[in-house]
Structures are given as structure tokens and as C-alpha cells.
Amino acid sequence: QVQLVESGGGLVQTGGSLRLSCAASGRTFSTYTMAWFRQAPGKEREFVAGIRWSGGSTYYADSVKGRFTISRDNAKNTVYLQMNSLKPEDTAVYFCAAGAYGLMGHNSGYDYWGQGTQVTVSS
């Protein structure tokens, strides 16, 4: 069993930066694929970024490539999402997810989800 708790969301102006954190409980954290998703009002949840258990393989949605960076610290059971050059269209609730067989770019394979943290980018 894995429990995920996100933090770091908030209100930021266009062009600003935020760093999201996702703290995980459970001894198997280091073996899971971790990912960030987001959901804007009236839209479906979408994949943002993912990272394999070793941290050596990452994947990004085209909309955030070059602006967002996902990383993980298995010793701290934490995954991060550094978000730079934020745009109003990045406004959403951001969710952390974990799964032994999580698929990059898809919702499939993620067994555990956090409650989400709100990110609002003002124009």
C-alpha cells in the first residue's frame, strides 16, 4: 500500500515558477513508476510527466516539455515537479500517482493517487 500527499501548489503569475512535492509512504516506493497528472475545470485528467523507478527515464507531455522537470529521491520517498515559465493554461489541480506498471503518457497502470494540489497561474 502506498499513500501519496502532494504539496507546493499555489498562485503564481505568468512566467513564474513552482515546485510541487509528493511524499509517499510505503516500502515499495522505490520500485514504482511515479507520475504527475493535472485536471483543469471542465477537462479530463491529463498526463504531465513521469519517471521510472530508477530515475533514469523520464517522459513529458508536449505541452510542458522544456518547462517542467520531474525528479525523485527514493531515499526520501519523494517525487518532485519543478515548473518554470508557467502559463495560464497550466492552471489545474495537480495529482501525484504511483504504479508498478504505470504507462507513460496514459492513465493506465497507476494504482495510487494523491488528493491533488491546486496550481493557479494568473495572466
Image: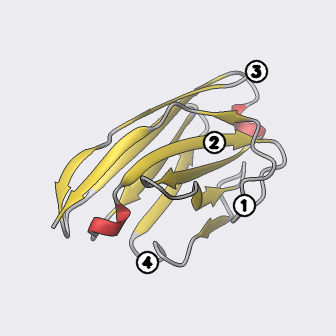
Q: Are marks 2 and 3 in contact (CB under 8 Å)?
A: no
Could you give the CA–CA distance between mark 4 and mark 2, rounded to whole angstroms? 21 Å
Label 2: state its secondary structure: strand
The quadrant in which the N terminus is found is top right
Looking at the image, do the residues carrying marks 1 and 3 touch, with CB atoms under 8 Å apart?
Answer: no
Q: What residue is rendered at 71% in x and 37% in y?
A: 30
Which is nearer the N-term, disc 4 or disc 3? 3
Q: For residue 105, which quarter of the picture? A: bottom right
- Mark 1 or mark 4, earlier in chain: 4
- Residue marked by disc 2: 97
Q: Which residue is denoted by mark 3 in the rendering?
A: 1
The amino acid type found where label 4 is placed reads: Gly
Question: Cα distance, mark 1 to mark 2?
Answer: 11 Å
Give the image location of residue 48, x and y in percent. 54, 61
Residue 80, percent across and down? Answer: 47, 47
Residue at figure coordinates x 28%, y 69% from the top left? 87
Q: Residue furthest front?
A: 42
Across and down, in percent, residue 33 comes to: 72, 48
Figure quadrant of residue 20: top left
User: Image point 49% across, 36% down: which residue?
Assistant: 22
Of the numbered discs in the image, which one, if any, rests on residue 106?
A: 1
| Amino acid found under the numbered disc labelled 1 | His
Outermost residue, right direction? 101
The tag earlier along the polypeptide, 4 or 2, is 4
Q: Compute the Cα span from label 4 to label 3.
A: 33 Å
Q: Amino acid at mark 3?
A: Gln
Q: Classify 87 as above or below 18.
A: below
Q: CA distance from mark 2 to mark 3?
A: 13 Å
Q: Is residue 62 visible?
A: yes
Measured Cα–Cα span from mark 1 to mark 3:
21 Å
